Image (cartoon, rainbow, N blue to C red):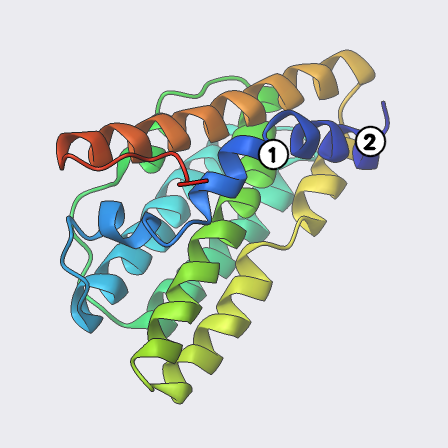
Amino acid sequence: MDAGATIDAVRDQTETERDRLGSDKVLIAATDATLETEAVLTAATIREAGLADILGQWAAETDSDVAAQFEAATEAATERANRIDADAGGPDGFIDHLETVSGTARRVGAGLVAAPLVADRFYLQVVSFFINEADEQRADMFREIRREASALDDGETALGHLSESERETAAAAATEAIDSAYDDYAETLEAMGLDPKPIC
């Protein structure tokens, strides 16, 4: 598989989990059912600041061509966190999972493929929240943040630096990271007495 096919494979393997991570319950889980502006901003900042910290650490620990992509993604996540401009609490479940990932190929998959795919679903609901709050300025800001955070350019470039077997390792790590994000989301909702599965 080339880089593009690797990303497509991850999308295919995680379609159900990503669909559910884009449900209107995702902010209930992320804010501990505190659906207020500051809580939503904090949840977004936690994700971006945590991602920036981890990617920055990986960039420093990587001596391959992939380091440049980790560095670029670190700068982008830092800029997004600064733009959101809210206090960040402790890391969420997805960030906790990223902290356990080791090895360059696995880190490419988790940090540069899975993270953008998860961000796309998360920010879909952040945009919807601010539309419902009639806060068009923040809705516009998060539309832009969603576009940037879900971009897979760094992931595709980094995958291109890997061998085919390493790309397979990266794909497995990306799938595992998305599964972890979904498991954390589902467990949080279930602890609140809510069903993470959509009502059909």
Residue 100 location, quadrant: top left
Q: Which one is in front, 55 or 193?
A: 193
User: Residue 183: image x %, image y %?
Assistant: 35, 26
Above-or-below relation of 86 to 187: below
Q: Amino acid at mark 2?
A: Ala
Nearer to us of marks 1 and 2 is 1
User: Residue 164: image x %, image y %?
Assistant: 81, 17
Residue 99 relative to residue 150: left or right:
left
Using the rendered image of the protein, determine whether residue 196 is visible from the camera's viewpoint.
yes
Question: Which residue is at 63% across, 45% downward?
Answer: 69
Using the rendered image of the protein, determine whether residue 96 is visible from the camera's viewpoint.
no
User: Looking at the rendered structure, which numbered label has been put on residue 5?
Assistant: 2
Q: Residue furthest right?
A: 2
The answer for how far apart the CA atoms under marks 1 and 2 are is 15 Å
Q: Residue furthest top?
A: 165
Q: Secondary structure at mark 2?
A: helix
Q: Which one is in front, 187 or 46?
A: 187
Q: Amino acid at mark 1?
A: Glu
Q: Secondary structure at mark 1?
A: helix
Q: Residues within 10 Å of mark 1 (few under 14, many from 20)?
A: few
User: Residue 133: image x %, image y %?
Assistant: 29, 80
User: Looking at the rendered structure, which numbered label has been put on residue 135?
Assistant: none
Pointer 1 or 2: first along the chain: 2
Which residue position is annotated with label 1?
15
